[in-house]
Amino acid sequence: MIKNILFDFDGVILDSMPIREYGFREIFKDFDDNLVEKLLYYHNQNGGLSRYVKIRYFYEKLLNRDISDNEIKVLAESFSQIMKKELINKKYLIDKTVEFLETSYKKYNLHIVSGSDEEELKYLCRYLDVKKYFISINGSPTHKNNLVKNLLTMYKYNINETILIGDSINDYEAAKVNDISFYGYNNKKLVDFSTHYIYSFEILK
């Protein structure tokens, strides 16, 4: 029996990937376009990773430059300001997910575990009026694997009663390393990795 559901945010609750692409283009607009495109490819292949990891990847792997933690923090904050401005529009909410949240939040213990910045997540969830559905909202810079581990420990959740819903391979890996079931959503490449793939939330009702 499922009692606890951990949700990824981007691509699961909010259709935010195009806006996040825009954010990376903006903070790196003074750099070579080809390198930025390589970053965006990495970004799209690794939806569950935090912007901190992606910014470091851009500098260290694509630019072959060192970057300090403080410089990453400054760039991440610039990115966050763009997100806070653009993503508070409710048109980006994924209707099927929101419908499930509205009808099921009293039935399950719901949490968000995301690669997005935690402070930004809480801001967006408040403005998008979805904060009320979740017991906790958790994000980067803590790695998603650890976010899941921490929740399981803090709330003493039974791993056999807990699932993670996500749209990226990083979500699958966070579920796997913590021995909980993974339910893929909004990315059919994950069908083979999923305990169940969510074509419809009816499977959880």
Image (tube, rainbow, N blue to C red):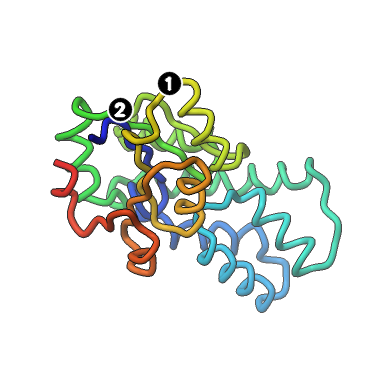
| CA distance separating discs 2 and 1 | 10 Å
Is 21 left, or right, of 98 in this rendering? right
| Residue lying furthest bottom | 34
| Quadrant (top left, top right, bottom left, bottom right) of the C terminus | top left
Is 12 left, or right, of 151 in this rendering? left
- Label annotation for residue 109: 2
The amino acid beneath tag 1 is: Tyr
Q: Nearer the viewer, residue 63 or 140?
A: 140
Is 75 left, or right, of 79 in this rendering? right
Residue appearing at x 38%, y 32% in the figure:
111
Residue named by callout 1: 155
The amino acid beneath tag 2 is: Asn
Question: At numbered mark 1, what does the secondary structure look like: helix, strand or loop?
Answer: loop
Q: Nearer the viewer, residue 71 or 197?
A: 197
Q: Position of residue 7 (x, y in %)?
A: 37, 42
- Label annotation for residue 165: none
Which one is earlier in the sequence, the residue at label 2 or at label 1?
Answer: 2
Residue appearing at x 65%, y 46% in the figure:
76
Q: Are marks 2 and 1 in contact (CB under 8 Å)?
A: yes
Q: Position of residue 20 (x, y in %)?
A: 50, 57
Q: Position of residue 204 (x, y in %)?
A: 19, 43
Label 1 Cα crowd, 10 Å radius (few <14 / some 14-19 / many 20+): few
Question: At numbered mark 2, what does the secondary structure look like: helix, strand or loop?
Answer: strand
Label 2 Cα crowd, 10 Å radius (few <14 / some 14-19 / many 20+): some
Residue appearing at x 33%, y 65% in the figure:
191
